[in-house]
Amino acid sequence: MTVSNLLPLTYSEVKQFAADWYSKLDVHAPLEEYVPLLAEEGLEMRFPETTVYGFDGFKDWYERVIRIFFDEVHTLKKVEPKPISDAQLEVKVVVRWEASVWNPPAAKSERIVLDAYQTWIVERSPKTEKPTILTYIVDSLDYAPGSAKL
């Protein structure tokens, strides 16, 4: 099925997709579970510390961050999709992210608590007919009072 023959994504699909994405991040899901969630071609992901391209770029980023952060909790606060075209949505996402980090030789870990403001470009996969992320941009971070910083 070509992209032009696919049904437009619905709000409920995109909201569930975002919830599933963050649920996987919370449990440090196996890397292969992310394959169907990310666009096969043209994937770009802009994080505060780096920009990565394609699944290999995501893999490198993911394998690094799951060794840094633990006890993660993502709480979805906002999912606001807006059509760009018949095939794509721009999705404004706000997620509360909490994570612990330990910086040796510190005696204790620190807790990061922030709201991450993001913009995603989501499209329906012609292979799976499910939503996939084409572009993932962390626009800004709003730290809670007393939070550790990245």
Image: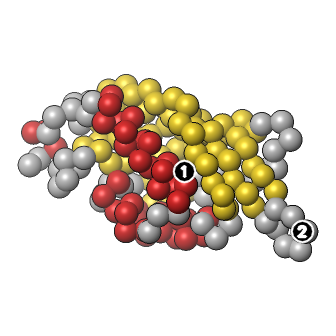
Residue 39 in percent (x, y) is at: 32, 54
Q: Kindly identify the residue that appears in the image at 49 percent across and 48 percent down.
A: 22
Label 1 secondary element: strand
Q: In this view, does 103 lie above or below 39?
A: below
Of the two numbered discs 1 and 2 in the rendering, the one whose residue sits closer to the viewer: 2
Q: Kindly identify the residue that appears in the image at 63 percent across and 39 percent down.
A: 96
The dot on residue 21 is none
Residue 13 in percent (x, y) is at: 30, 36
Q: Which amino acid lies under the numbered mark 2 shown in the image of this protein? A: Ala
Q: Kindly identify the residue that appears in the image at 65 percent across and 50 percent down.
A: 48
Label 2 secondary element: loop
> Residue 86 appears in which quarter of the rendering?
top left
Viewer-proximal residue among 131 and 16: 16
Residue 106 in percent (x, y) is at: 90, 68
Residue highlighted by disc 2? 106
> Residue 50 appears in which quarter of the rendering?
bottom right
100 displayed left or right of 116: right
> Residue 82 appears in which quarter of the rendering?
top left
Residue 11 seen in this snapshot: yes
Residue highlighted by disc 1? 46
Residue 57 seen in this snapshot: no
Q: Which amino acid lies under the numbered mark 1 shown in the image of this protein? A: Arg
Classify mark 1: residues with Cα within 10 Å, few (<14), some (14-19) or many (20+). some
46 displayed left or right of 145: left
Q: Kindly identify the residue that appears in the image at 43 percent across and 33 percent down.
A: 91
